[in-house]
Amino acid sequence: MKGVILAASIALVVLLVGYLAITSSSYEQVSQLSKYTKPTVVTVRALVADIETLPEKDLILFVLKDENGSKIYAFYGLTRFISQYGAPPSHSTVEQEVIMRGTFYPKKMGDVLGRMEIKEILQGCHKAYEAPPATGG
């Protein structure tokens, strides 16, 4: 009996540590990316200012911004997004705030700080699962 309680306690601690690691990770705001001068892997928490699908390039362009008005262009594979979420992205299936991990390439263009190649969408696009499947034609 003591062994079961000990095992359950250890499992609970491991789950709690994992949850805290995910939810308290160090996310950067878009404006904080201005400190980088070379390509860097980052995890960004941002607001979605716009979404554009570029089917001819098999890409999705997310325009991400923060409260300071700073923006980045973030790219993700369209086919990959549809295979993961079942439908192309739209403002109704992507939440206003997202968390994305990828490689940021600094190149200031007006209020745009650079571009990011998204490797992983951590939060904000899961509502796309609820969207109706894409149809041809």
Image (cartoon, rainbow, N blue to C red):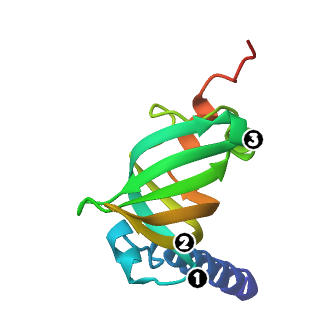
Most distant residue in the front direction: 109
Q: Residues within 10 Å of mark 2 (few under 14, many from 20)?
A: many
The numbered dot on residue 13 is: 1
Q: Label 1 sits on what residue type?
A: Val
The secondary structure type at the circle numbered 2 is strand
Q: Label 3 sits on what residue type?
A: Thr
Q: Residues within 10 Å of mark 1 (few under 14, many from 20)?
A: few
Q: Give the CA distance from mark 2 to mark 3.
A: 23 Å
Q: Give the CA distance from mark 2 to mark 1.
A: 38 Å
Quarter placement of the C terminus: top right
Image-based side of 72 in relation to 87, left or right = left
> In terms of image quadrants, where is residue 89?
top right
State which tag comes first along the sequence, 2 or 1: 1
Image-based side of 66 in relation to 106, left or right = left
Q: Is residue 67 above or below residue 19?
A: above
Q: Label 2 sits on what residue type?
A: Tyr
The numbered dot on residue 79 is: 3
Instruction: Judge by depth and name the residue closer to the eye, 45 or 60.
Output: 60
Residue located beneath label 2 in the image: 105
The numbered dot on residue 53 is: none
Numbered label tally = 3
Indicate which label's residue lies in the foreground, 3 or 1.
3
The residue that appears at 46% across and 67% down in the rendered structure is 44
> In terms of image quadrants, where is residue 72?
bottom left
